[in-house]
């Protein structure tokens, strides 16, 4: 498979075309805007928490296929997980897309997140893949209302 | 100091027609593979490539002449000063300024605009004075005016444009009033490609007694500029967009304005005499050139002008127009593609969007084909807001681009569409 095909895998194209958990949430516990000023991508992440668990999560906004699919897959993946589990997934995902981890050893348990392993070959696109995650991190960690990739 | 124009390149025309293949040979960087495919460089509005003659001139400067200018009594300092000042003369001739002292070396267009906004604005703008800029400005000709407006209490007003990306001249004329103190407008839009009717804008402004700065960064590589014919008060451009080095650019200003303006930065070279408490500033152009400048950049820019002089601008303009027409026609046949910026008078810049496909994805997939375009907001976020889009893909052509490269662009875009279908 070429590097380009590795990047635009079917999972990514599918989630770009039909994003899951897309649209606003009424009365969320946390709501944070994520923005990449270099390309104009922007997403809002809505989170509903019960105790320590992400009971529901949705997103809205616009961006490239990588950033949109990443937000969609992220929402599907972390729903029902604890805050600690979500943060741990972000750490692994970050290593995956920056090429710091050996993908083969990390893919187990990542599920559809593994589809983003091709991003590591495109350093300019790492920010696209991590925008939603940085936004979620801010939502879980603080009361910040806006994060940017810069 | 010499003012000789040296024709360093052989004739690039056959029977009066421009020959891009002869020009391409002057730009070695174009001859390479990217991702296994021949490089197709269509990001010229971001920065242009440099001909060997310019690279050689800069190497030669460092190999044979390097020294500091304007202050040494030794051989090399004298030589370096001569090369640097010769470049200033070449620039004067190139844009037909009256006097070499009206040519101020700066880092680029951005610094030129900041210089004028700070120096002219700080000394002359008062509360409720009005500054006019156009709706299609690059951030570099918008933010400096916002900053000085905030500092002085002046008001920034925006000359509107239509859906094609053309300024409303009638509305502009009505905006001019006794409170208007300055007009700053782009000659050629870096996003839309629009060539603005600056001659008329200058005429209307002068009729109202208002000075005009023209951001010429995207104009200088494509057309002959005659600042005296335009009668602009300031004209700013960058070396690197006109096949010269990065980090050097030019502010042209009428001596009458520059003489009356306070210095922009203080330091060496801009002084006549200094005591602990009082400094007498130097004459033009040194008054605005504090510190050791980008000497090799100036020398490189001089060599760039020698190079451009060896090419007929009229033929280049005609050739680039042909490329623009061809590309516009070819891109228009692609389903779901929309060109942003459809002014009647355009330079060879085409911004476009594709239905349901983000420009970044277009850029990544084209790069895989060896094609370099620019994607994003192009440092013109308000222009994006005007057209209701987050970003565009932009192909911008220079004199070394070919029809075959446009064909590659078109088949690359078809590949993008296929991947996303």
Image: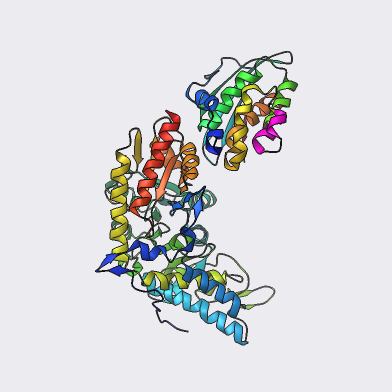
Q: Is residue A27 above or below residue A103?
A: above
Magenta region, residue range? A94-106
Confirm whether residue B162 shows in the render: no
Which one is nearer the viewer's eye here, B63 or B25?
B25
Residue ID at (44%, 77%): B89
In which quadrant of the rendered view does residue B280 lie?
A: bottom right
Confirm whether residue B94 shows in the render: yes
Which one is nearer the viewer's eye here, B231 or B240?
B240
Classified by dominant secondary structure, the portion drawn in magenta counts as helix
Residue ID at (51%, 27%): A61
Q: Is residue A100 magenta?
A: yes
Q: Is residue B281 magenta?
A: no
In what quadrant of the picture does the C terminus of chain B appear? Answer: top left
Q: Is residue A17 above or below residue B5?
A: above
In which quadrant of the rendered view does residue A53 lie?
A: top right
Query: Where residue B211 sits: x, y (%)?
Result: 38, 61
Q: Is residue B371 above or below residue A146?
A: below
The residue most toward the front is A1
């Amino acid at each position: 498979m070429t590097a380009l095909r590795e990047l635009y895998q079917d999972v990514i194209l599918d989630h770009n075309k039909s994003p899951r958990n897309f649209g606003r949430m009424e009365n969320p516990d946390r709501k944070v805007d994520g923005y990449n000023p270099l390309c104009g991508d922007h997403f809002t992440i809505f989170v509903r928490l019960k105790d320590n668990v992400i009971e529901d999560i949705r997103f809205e906004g616009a961006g490239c296929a990588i950033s949109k699919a990443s937000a969609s897959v992220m929402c599907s993946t972390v729903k029902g997980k604890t805050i600690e589990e979500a943060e741990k997934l972000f750490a692994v995902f970050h290593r995956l897309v920056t090429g710091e981890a050996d993908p083969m050893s990390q893919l187990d348990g990542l599920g559809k997140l593994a589809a983003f392993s091709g991003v590591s070959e495109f350093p300019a696109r790492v920010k696209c893949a991590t925008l939603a995650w940085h936004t979620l991190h801010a939502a879980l960690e603080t009361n910040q209302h806006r994060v940017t990739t810069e | 100091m010499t003012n000789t124009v040296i024709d360093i390149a052989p004739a690039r025309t056959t029977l009066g027609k421009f020959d891009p293949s002869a020009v391409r040979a002057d730009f070695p960087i174009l001859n390479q593979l990217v991702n296994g495919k021949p490089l197709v460089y269509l990001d010229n509005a971001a920065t242009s490539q440099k001909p060997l003659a310019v690279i050689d001139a800069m190497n030669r400067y460092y190999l044979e002449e390097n020294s500091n200018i304007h202050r040494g009594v030794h051989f090399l300092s004298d030589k370096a000063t001569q090369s640097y000042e010769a470049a200033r003369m070449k620039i004067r001739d190139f844009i037909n300024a009256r006097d070499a002292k009206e040519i101020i070396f700066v880092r680029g267009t951005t610094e030129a605009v900041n210089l004028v906004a700070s120096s002219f604005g700080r000394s002359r703008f008062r509360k409720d004075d009005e500054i006019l800029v156009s709706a299609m400005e690059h951030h570099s000709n918008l933010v400096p005016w916002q900053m000085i407006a905030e500092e002085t209490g002046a008001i920034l007003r925006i000359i509107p444009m239509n859906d094609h990306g053309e300024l409303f001249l009638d509305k502009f004329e009505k905006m001019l009033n006794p409170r208007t103190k300055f007009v700053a407008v782009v000659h050629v839009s870096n996003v839309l490609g629009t060539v603005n009717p600056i001659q008329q804008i200058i005429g209307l402004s002068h009729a109202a007694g208002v000075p005009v700065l023209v951001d010429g960064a995207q104009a200088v590589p494509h057309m002959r500029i005659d600042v005296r014919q335009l009668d602009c008060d300031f004209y700013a451009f960058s070396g690197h967009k006109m096949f010269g080095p990065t980090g050097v650019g030019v502010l042209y200003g009428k001596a009458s304005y520059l003489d009356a303006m306070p210095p922009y930065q203080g330091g060496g070279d801009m002084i006549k005499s200094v005591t602990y408490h009082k400094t007498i500033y130097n004459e033009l152009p040194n008054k605005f050139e504090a510190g050791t400048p980008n000497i090799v950049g100036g020398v490189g820019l001089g060599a760039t002008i020698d190079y451009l002089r060896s090419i007929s601008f009229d033929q280049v303009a005609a050739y680039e127009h042909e490329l623009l027409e061809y590309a516009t026609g070819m891109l228009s046949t692609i389903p779901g593609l929309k060109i942003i910026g459809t002014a009647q008078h355009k330079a060879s810049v085409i911004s476009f969007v594709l239905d349901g496909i983000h420009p970044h994805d277009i850029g990544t997939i084209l790069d895989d084909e060896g094609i370099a375009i620019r994607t994003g907001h192009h440092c013109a976020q308000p222009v994006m807001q005007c057209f209701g889009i987050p970003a565009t893909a932009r192909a911008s052509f220079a004199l070394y681009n070919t029809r075959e490269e446009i064909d590659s662009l078109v088949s690359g875009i078809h590949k993008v569409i296929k991947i996303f279908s």
